[in-house]
């Protein structure tokens, strides 16, 4: 594999013309987040594929459930309905809110009836960088995606900078992450830091039992999987295009009011490309005359978006190999 000359946008999405200078600016932003090389104590390395040339020998999908594990621990383990309520009521204007698995959602309602649920893994970093380059393009994307009368003033703060916590991304809709930990830098750092732990361990538990005490699903999953590759003395990085993606949605157990299975087609990817989904919506066709909250999952009425979030798998893709000229 040759050195990456330009990091791609998440899901290789093209929000600008192919010859736009934005793509070079995004490349420089991503390149700046990854250390050139983070060597471990036993031969494994986390590396920057724009700086270190590596022969890739394998890829690994690292996935976890989008539903936030922290709302189940330690007090809500036996009260699933309260956990659903807590996750749905996350205040996305508070950047420490409960949706902290690199996965967030918004429940659309008509009075108390759930009409649609929107799930996202889009990075706020991407929108911030686009805003610096062309604020009008960000407004256009909001309008096209949300089908709402979004104005430029709605999306910026008093200094004219992009407002991550704008109304169309919090109280009145969702475009991307707001949780403080759900950032591209944090995702890269989570994988990168594993090279710092002892690599002579026989297994993941010996490497660092503390992994198992994390309250999220994502942290131990990424830590364990990346550390396993580093213990093999491999060069490890995230695969292009770097991003957080929705890998799957489980339709089992979802039923219509008459008891028949709900069609899988009611899940609709809205942003992404080449199988890398970053925005997913669930709704019932209007012509049928009923809403999402008229459906059931496992015989229970759908009262919360979290019930569907529990059916969604998200993750990243890593790659591993040996440095050019290195012998295993």
Image (spheres, rainbow, N blue to C red):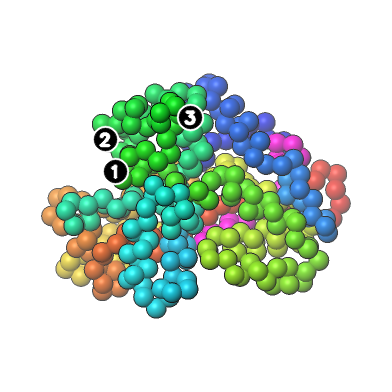
- The residue sitting at 76% across, 48% down in the picture is 38
Q: Is residue 220 left or right of residue 68?
A: right
Q: Which residue is mark 3?
A: 130
- The residue sitting at 43% across, 26% down in the picture is 160
Dot in front, 2 or 1: 1
Q: Can you give x and y, in whole percent of width and height, for residue 212 in the image?
A: 61, 70
The numbered mark at residue 148 is 2
Element type where label 2 sits in the image: loop
The numbered mark at residue 172 is 1
Whichever of labels 3 and 1 marks the residue nearer the N terminus, that label is: 3
In this rendering, the answer to whether 233 lies above or below 279 is: below
Q: Residue furthest bottom?
A: 78
Q: Quadrant of residue 208?
A: bottom right
Q: Can you give x and y, in whole percent of width and height, for residue 163 in the image?
A: 42, 35
- The residue sitting at 76% across, 44% down in the picture is 37
In this rendering, the answer to whether 168 lies above or below 112 is: above
Magenta-tinted stretch:
48-64
Dot in front, 3 or 1: 1
Q: Is residue 67 left or right of residue 308?
A: right
In this rendering, the answer to whether 167 lies above or below 43 is: above
Q: Quadrant of the N terminus?
A: top right
Element type where label 3 sits in the image: helix
Q: Is residue 211 left or right of residue 285?
A: right
The numbered mark at residue 101 is none
Q: Residue furthest front?
A: 158
Q: Main secondary structure of the magenta part?
A: strand
- The residue sitting at 42% across, 43% down in the picture is 176
């Amino acid at each position: 594999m040759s050195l990456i000359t330009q990091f791609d946008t998440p899901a290789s999405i093209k929000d600008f013309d192919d010859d736009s200078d934005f793509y070079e600016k995004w490349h420089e932003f991503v390149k700046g987040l990854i250390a050139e090389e983070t060597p471990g104590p036993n031969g494994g390395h986390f590396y920057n594929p724009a700086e270190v040339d590596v022969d890739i020998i394998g890829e690994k999908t690292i996935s976890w459930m989008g539903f936030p594990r922290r709302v189940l621990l330690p007090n809500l383990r036996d009260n699933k309905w309260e956990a659903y309520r807590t996750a749905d009521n996350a205040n996305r204007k508070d950047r420490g809110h409960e949706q902290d698995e690199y996965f967030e959602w918004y429940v659309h309602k008509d009075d108390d009836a759930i009409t649609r649920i929107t799930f996202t893994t889009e990075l706020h970093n991407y929108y911030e960088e686009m805003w610096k380059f062309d604020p009008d393009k960000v407004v256009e994307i909001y309008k096209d995606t949300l089908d709402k009368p979004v104005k430029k003033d709605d999306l910026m703060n008093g200094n004219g900078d992009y407002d991550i916590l704008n109304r169309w991304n919090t109280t009145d809709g969702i475009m991307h992450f707001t949780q403080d930990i759900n950032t591209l830098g944090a995702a890269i750092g989570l994988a990168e830091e594993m090279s710092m732990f002892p690599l002579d361990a026989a297994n993941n538990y010996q490497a660092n039992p503390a992994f198992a005490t994390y309250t999220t699903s994502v942290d131990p999953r990424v830590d364990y999987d990346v550390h396993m590759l580093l213990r093999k003395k491999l060069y490890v990085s995230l695969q292009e295009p770097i991003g957080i993606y929705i890998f799957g949605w489980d339709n089992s157990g979802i039923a219509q009011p008459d008891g028949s299975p709900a069609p899988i087609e009611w899940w609709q990817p809205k942003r992404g490309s080449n199988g890398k989904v970053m925005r997913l919506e669930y709704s019932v066709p209007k012509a049928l005359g009923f809403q999402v909250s008229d459906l059931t999952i496992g015989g229970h009425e759908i009262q919360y978006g979290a019930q569907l979030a529990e059916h969604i798998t998200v993750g990243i893709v890593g790659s591993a190999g040996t440095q050019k000229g290195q012998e295993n």
